[in-house]
Amino acid sequence: MFRIEAFVDDKRLAEALRALTGLAVGSPAVQPVVNGAKKNGKVVAVSEGEIEDLFAKWVKSKRLTELTPTDAKAFIKSIGRSTGSYTYFMRQLIKKGVLKKRAVKGKPPFVVVS
């Protein structure tokens, strides 16, 4: 028996899973690669993989200046983590100076520091 690991492009995931149907024992474990990109036929890191780098890239792509808990959960889910741990990650980002907490009623609770 052998274990196979492979990187598959998002668009080809369903095709790869269908191809494994009937061949694999059990269901294959699918996990998103957050910090990877295809370059010259290899998977390379886009950034150093630190949470603040990933967060900065995500915020820039979404054009956010303020962050709500829903946005925070979406970010955490996008990096392949459990949405239940978003408060821990937000505290880490506040410690590292990437986010500021705001205590104004009617406004989102976090401000993105650029």
Image (cartoon, rainbow, N blue to C red):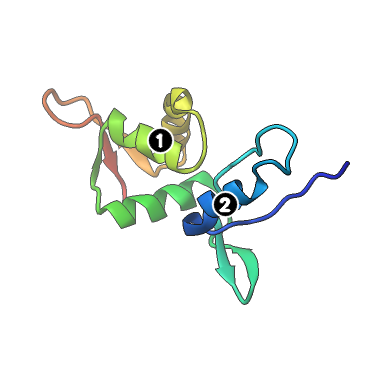
Residue 34 visible = no
The residue at 57%/67% (across/down) is 38
Mark 2 against mark 1, which lies toward the viewer? 2
The Cα–Cα distance between marks 2 and 1, rounded to whole angstroms, is: 18 Å
The x and y percentages for residue 83 are: 44, 28
The x and y percentages for residue 20 are: 66, 47
Residue 42 picture quarter? bottom right
Which secondary structure, mark 1? Answer: helix
The residue at 54%/46% (across/down) is 32
The x and y percentages for residue 43 are: 63, 64
Characterize the local packing of mark 2: few (<14), some (14-19) or many (20 or more) Cα atoms within 10 angstroms.
few
The residue at 51%/34% (across/down) is 81
Characterize the local packing of mark 1: few (<14), some (14-19) or many (20 or more) Cα atoms within 10 angstroms.
some
Which secondary structure, mark 2? Answer: loop
Q: Earlier in the sequence, mark 2 or mark 1?
A: 2
The label shown at residue 59 is none
What type is the residue that disc 1 sits on?
Ile
User: Furthest-front residue in view?
Assistant: 22
Left or right for 4, reference 65: right
Q: Nearer the viewer, residue 4 or 51?
A: 4
Q: Is residue 28 above or below residue 38?
A: above
Q: Quadrant of the N terminus?
A: top right
Which residue was labeled with disc 2? 49
Q: Is residue 105 above or below residue 33?
A: above
What type is the residue that disc 2 sits on?
Gly
The x and y percentages for residue 40 are: 62, 77
Q: Nearer the viewer, residue 41 or 46?
A: 41
User: Furthest-right residue in view?
Assistant: 1
The label shown at residue 94 is 1
